[in-house]
Image: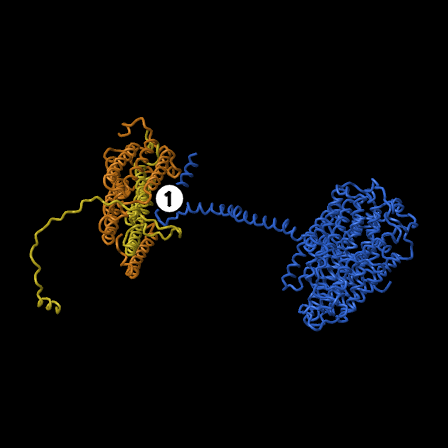
Chain colours: A orange, B blue, C yellow
Amino acid sequence: MIASILPSISPGTLLAGGITAAAASLWLLLPSGRSGAADRTARWLGWLLGIVALAGFLATGHRLGSVGEEAVFLTVALVAVISGAATVVSRSPVYAAIWFAMALAGVSGVLLVLGGQFLGVATIVVYAGAILVMFLFVLMLAQPAGLAPYDRVSTEPLLAAVAGAVLLGILSLSIGRLTAEPPACCLMGGTKAALLADSATTEPPAAAATGIDMLADNHVARLGGELFGRHLLAVEVAGVLLLAALIGSIAIVSRGAADAEPAAARRAVP
Amino acid sequence: MNALSPSTLLVLVPLLPLVGAILTVALGRVLGARAHLPAVAGIAAAFVVAVMLLFGMAREVGVGTTGHDHAAKPVEMVTTLWEWAVVGDAAAAGDAGSAAQLFSIPVALRLDPLTATLLVIITGVGLLVAIYSIGYMHGDPGYPRFFALVSAFVFSMSMLVAASNFLLVYVFWEAVGACSYLLIGFWFTKPEAAKAAKKAFLVNRIGDFGLAVATFLLWMTYGTLNFHDTTLADGTLMPGILGATRLADASAYVGGAVGTAICLLFLLAACGKSAQLPLHVWLPDAMEGPTPASSLIHAATMVTAGIYLVARTAPLFEACPGALTLVSIVGATTALVAALIGTVQNDLKRVLAYSTISQLGYMFASLGTGTLLGFTAAIFHLVTHAFFKALLFMGAGSVMHSMGGVIDMRRFGGLRRIMPITAATFLVGSLALAGVAPFAGFFSKDEILASLHSRGWPDAHGEHLEAAPAGGHANAAATFHLAFHTASVTPDAAQLAGGARGSALDALNTPATWRILFWMSLVTAALTAFYTFRAVFMTFTGPTRVPEEAGHHAHESPPSMTIPLVILAALSAVSGWWLFSTHSLASFLASTPSFTAPSVASTATPPAFHWDLAIQGTLAAAIGIVVAALGHLGRRSDGPQMERFLGPLETLFANRFFFDQIYSALIVKPLELIATLAALIDRRVIDGLVDAIARVPAGLGTVVRHLQSGLMQRYALAGVIGTLLIVLALVARAMG
Amino acid sequence: MNLLANTVAPSALVIDGLVVGAILFALGLVGILARRNLIVMFLCAELMLQGISVSLVSWSRHHGDWGGHVLVIFVLTVAACEAAVALVFVLQAFARTGRLDSAAWQSLRESNLPRTIDRELPAIDTVPPKFPKLAPAGVEPAADEDALHEREHV
């Protein structure tokens, strides 16, 4: 719908413009040591450019099967992306963590839309419930009072933004080429015509072709069967890894506490 | 002639002194005061062998049995010991058709009349000097070292005159130079001695350079360095530079620029070794060495190496008359200048040193005439000079020995009462040097004057020279000349030297030049007599005075020193007359291959005693002696006679014509300036350039170093950018 | 007109998922490169992992395979381990320097280079909080010696 407003601009230009706007937006939004009015102006400009960039991306987008599905996907995707950006640019690490929680919510929504019910929930539970809380605990332990100087500046913000933009450009290009030339793997188990016929639907074509229906009932049971069937050994290894990380963390903390005692005197905030 | 073959005997001559030297070095510490034994025994045995060779060679040549008025045939014997260096395969060289380019250095010894004569002189004088040194060097801490060096010198010098290859000549030319260096610097703790040794070495390097370049030119010009003809592996005959094949061919020697260059380089080498102008400055300083060494090396033998070299390469010089004339000019000038300097020296050894330079100049003047008479006269004078100059040096050494090391003539007088044998033998030597009638120097000097005279006034000797192209068959009628008539200048005088092929130097070759040279020589003769007898009178006559260094035991030297003096005195007295009257040496030497080249042999003249020249020479000597007697006889030797007599000239002579100062100003100072400049350039420009280049990477490093900031996020950024660049390149390739 | 949607093998939803994953990954990358706070850097790393997860699930949907899902589960595991260990390190680092600054460690620099020091930052123009002035609410009570004594023996 936005695309119809801008009929004369080619999608390549739109994408390039969007990516450039995103890079500029990030550069402006990243902490730069400015203060006062200049900082506020830069932030406003940055958010504005961010909106422009998102508009550009949306303009290159396409319609999903139904308006409802599209609305849902767009909502969760926007939540994920905007919260992610806010995570990156937040001055305060606490805010960053909160924004990261929002991003996690968006991501879990995207995962749900993509058919990963279990993963969507697991992400919320594991990340937001466990990992993020750990982060916040650490912040409580370690964050000095007020806004630290190192939170107000960035390392090479421009170069970092450009690097990110280039990466995004490369990824977009290769994703765009996927649509033009389906890789050979996508043709396995079905004719090209069948695949082409399915292309506009929300049904996963390969799923239909191979008979595995991820969106069917017993989703979690199937995933568990897969996990504890084919990937049993990997699960065991992952368990050992978790145990090792646990023991390692405790060991480092207990040893480091002894070492850190003499350094406690130096703990003055610059 | 005896059980041992001549070639074995020839090898023994250098070998025995070498063994003596090695034994002295090895056993010197054990033998202690008897360290002279191996050296003396080795040199004595070598002397015996050399005498045997000389007589064998004389029999071969047939001295006295055949007449002198036919062309002498070359006599030589070459012994190739081993091939020292062979470059290139003989067969391959033959296939390529360039056998002449095969480079091989045979260690070949030769025996011919010239070599035989010189071997006897070297080993004979060497033996006498060695015996003399037993007394002279007694108690010196370096006693074994001295004898080892003397023995090594006799070995090197024998090899030098016996070598049949220019490279070997060069090698032993350097070897005698090294022995000379070591003997001059024998008392190396004495700064003057070390300095003198260094000076001698450096000045000799200039001459050695000439010899080296001359050797290269010879190789490039003639394709071989051998004197003798050699037969290659494929049977072809390779004519040696002084071999029979080339000698027979009058046009086989290169003249022109290349030939002149070779000859001038040889002359440079000879000037260095024989202390001729302008390279003579080292010899007077070389008197810092032990007197026996001065006697052997810097009077009798080594300094005559230059004479030997020019005489040996006579055919090469004959092809370049200009160079030959220059030899004479250098010789006569040196003779005159050195004699002038000698007149004001107060150091007895230095008087003799300048005398040596002067006499060597005589020999060069004689060689330069390019006639057979000139060459044989030079060798003749070499022989007699070896006797009387060795005698004089040893006499000076004897005086020095008993005067506690003092050699300044002004500090002693009337020594004939203290050391009669030394005085008598010194007088004999002086008479011989001055050229007084029956003594050796008279005859040899007469021949030299005759050879110069024959070039200056060709008409007087014309009947022989005009017939020369026919091979010297002129009759022997003219034995008496009156040289006081004027002669017209022959316009084609240059051709007298034979085979003139053009060189700028040839313009010098006019009778006028030779006349000047002749008169210079005559003046030199008078000066020689003067300074010699000045020394005699100052030292041995007048009131008896002994320097306090001598203490109360001023006495005649021990027999080991006086016996060689007596022997040499006897030789100085009679050898000249004997060798001249029998004409044995001249006819013997005429069979030397180098002197049988047509260009030399054609100038042969019958033996003659030139009364006119003899009278002139004797007159000159008499004038010199009389003036010396007027000035010094019976007076205290420390009077200011010379200063009064010469006036301002005395300063010039006493300062040796300012040669050392001129060299210092012209060569040493500019070189030091250039060196300073070069050092400055090196330090500022070259080093600056190098430093500038070195600063480029350092500067780049300074720029790039800031990337290495230690901030890990920058490192991560660099890693990401690098990865993205690689991915971009891959994408671009996939899309392109 | 539509860059990503003509005759595509992957469905539009998959493509959109991939794009969202790419955006999240790029955002995380920028954050990790630019932000100085160690904890924020780790949050950005987690953000990148989220982008990867979205991509994996998209591909899983495309292939109709469980592989992507399984991988995401392992990503979760590894992320948990990483967070545990990394946060311990962060705590240790803070214990040593009193800061969460990634620029506090610069030992890996050229030996003769000076340490990189931040330029002086302008002051934050925040209004200092105004606390209400209250009247003193009484006097400090005198300590009851007996009660203290008693407490010591409890």
Is B538 in front, or is C134? B538
Residue at mark 1: chain: B
Q: Looking at the picture, how far across and down is residue B565, in whole percent?
A: 78, 66
Is A13 on the left or on the right of B130, as rendered?
left
Is B140 in front, or is A169? B140
The single residue placed furthest to the top in the displayed view is A8
Q: Looking at the picture, how far across and down is residue B105, in whole percent?
A: 74, 53
Q: Up-down: is B81 above or below A9?
A: below
Instruction: State which quarter of the image contains the C terminus of chain B.
Output: top left
- Badge count: 1
Is B453 on the left or on the right of C47, as rendered?
right
Whether residue B92 appears in this view of the structure is no
Q: Looking at the picture, how far across and down is residue B190, in whole percent?
A: 63, 63
Instruction: State which quarter of the image contains the N terminus of chain B.
Output: bottom right
- From the image, tell me which residue sits under label 1: B720
The picture quadrant where one finds residue A268 is bottom left
Whether residue A90 appears in this view of the structure is yes
The single residue placed furthest to the bottom in the displayed view is B552
Is A28 in front, or is B220? B220
Q: Up-down: is A249 above or below B713?
A: below
Q: What amino acid is found at the position of numbered circle 1 in the picture? A: Val
Is B721 in front, or is B60? B60
The single residue placed furthest to the left in the displayed view is C138
- Disc 1: CA contacts within 10 A as few (<14), some (14-19) or many (>=20): some
Residue drawn 7% across and 52% down? C135
Q: Looking at the picture, how far across and down is residue A87, in whole percent?
A: 26, 44
Q: Secondary structure at mark 1?
A: helix
